Image (tube, helix red, strand yellow):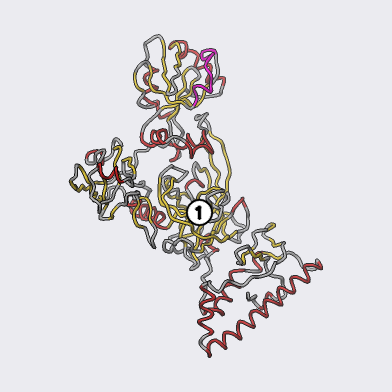
Amino acid sequence: MLACPSNLVSKPPLALKADSSNKTYLSSKFTDGKISRRPSVVSVPSPSKPCHRQLQLSLSQSSKGQSRLCSIKEEVSSLAKTLLYWSRNYEDGTVDEVDLQDFRWDNIRNKFFKTLCGFVVAEPPLDAVVKVTCFSANPDFTRPWQREQECASSSGFIIPGRRVLTCAHSVDHHTQVKLKRHGSDTTYTATVLAMAPESDIALLTVKDDAFWEGVKPVDFGDLPAPKDELIIAGYPMDREQLCAIRGTMSKARVVPYYHSGTKLLALQLNVVLKGGNSGGPVFSVKGKCVGIAFQGSETSGGEIIPVPIIKHFLQDFDKNGADTGVPSFGINWQEMENPDLRASMKMRSDQQGVLVTEILPRYPESDMLKPYDVILSIDGVNIANDGTVPLSRGQRIDFSHLITRKFKGDKVQVKVLRNSKIQEFTIKLSCRKQFMPANTKGRPLSYYIIGGFVFTTLSIPYLQSMYLQDYDYLPEKLLSQAFYEDRVVVCNLLKADINNGYDEMAVVCNQVLTLNGKPVKSLKNLAVTVENCEEGFLKFVLENGKTVVLEAKAAKAETPDILKAHCISSAMSDDLKT
């Protein structure tokens, strides 16, 4: 029941495979962009499918039905001849492998659906999908004075205004970015206009006019609903050929974005994304972009950055010329689904909300909200006891989306229940006070070395690099410290006589709580305290209870020799010298 263009009858079609759900899909088994598998039987869609119901409706109209029925017979006959040709000649070994560009499954599907139902499923603008190659100088969090050059590929796509979107993690720490259009053998040097670490989006452009010739930019669509069919396009596994796979949206939810740890709206897919898919567009069946592929796992499937997050980034850039960040509500909270908990807060049966458990420092909220306040609504949107609010088409998500969809400096109306009384506050939103390492903007990491002990600032990228796959299971307290507090950790131990007897495993990755009895407030505070120390010893107390003691004069005297042995130019990063 699939039509093949007449000019392709002499060539075998793409390999098709039928899965257990009785649907036909494009085979994903390619060899250098060639199809090498023979087709299996093409299955007929279930009568419950929308296209089949529309076919029945169309055929019920006698005059139009007879005409379409004739067209269908012609299409089926044409496809049958093509499949028969493939089968016979493939077995004889007389047919070469078919190039991906010679046969477009989407073209056949669209033509068939048009004949069947009188409508066309729009083909995605695949010509706007580009391959992104990034040369980067990535930081080494255990040796923060040096970097490692790497080259990695990902995907991107062209949008209006001579701009290209991709993921921020795809071009992070970039030294050079190259773009290659679909079907072209020419690479173009790109300039990074803006990067948003929180939303994991980067905006690029190319000065060469030839790059933009003959390409239609991608248009954005609406937020899809669960079970909507989607098309994920990109260049996985460093392939030169564009690959498009099909999937469906599973659900919308607020999740931590791995690149920054920020919790934002994301859409979960039922297919696994591969390395290189990052930055590629995700299309609806109408040919509109509904998101950017960016992360996922083998067990839960891929995740995409949805259109609301993308548009937020673009609006921010158009208004401010840069990414100004994503607002955050500086509170910790808990759900209120337990009836006894609600009763203790003197909530009426018709009231719902979430309980504030902690107000984070240095946020505007700390001047208005208090622990044990019950947040009932934000900007008139009621919050359920499970902490969710309506999204669209019956979907519900974490209420934090009401905040992150705003811009820095915007105001929100917050209604709370405090001591059985309803109060309303107008809060001006600020961005998260997150101590991300400065190298996200292209600057080196901060570090300080004394007596072979290397200190740096605790951060989300540091935790990701040190804990790798275990990052998702880190304690909430540790992540909160990395987000909101300037904490100092021991990131390495360069062995020398001065630190003999100290076990690297016992000190590395531990926070420094105090130095000579005083709290360590920041890395610069630690460096200044050590440099100006007139006491006989340097006593560091770590979070795990271990204590490190160094003779002050001996540690300072031996540090230059340690630096020389490891080819380190300075005992501290440049930002600590001022």
For label 1, the crowd category at 10 Å Cα-Cα, with few meaning under 14, some 14 to 19 and many 20 or more, is: many
**Residue 345 sits in quarter:** top left
- In the image, what residue occupies the spot 65% across and 79% down? 76
Quadrant including the N terminus: bottom right
- In the image, what residue occupies the spot 61% across and 65% down? 25
Residue at the front extreme? Answer: 340
Q: Nearer the viewer, residue 232 or 208?
A: 232
Quadrant including the C terminus: top left
Task: Determine the secondary structure under disc 1.
Answer: strand
Residue at the top extreme? Answer: 536
* 501 falls in the magenta region: yes
Q: Is residue 31 left or right of residue 562?
A: right
Q: Position of residue 378 (x, y in %)?
A: 27, 51
Q: Range of the magenta residues? A: 497-508
Residue on which the image places disc 1: 293
Q: Is residue 400 left or right of residue 489?
A: left
- In the image, what residue occupies the spot 37% across and 19% down? 529
Q: Is residue 202 above or below residue 1?
A: above
Three-letter code for the amino acid on which mark 1 is drawn:
Ala
Q: Is residue 542 left or right of residue 347?
A: right
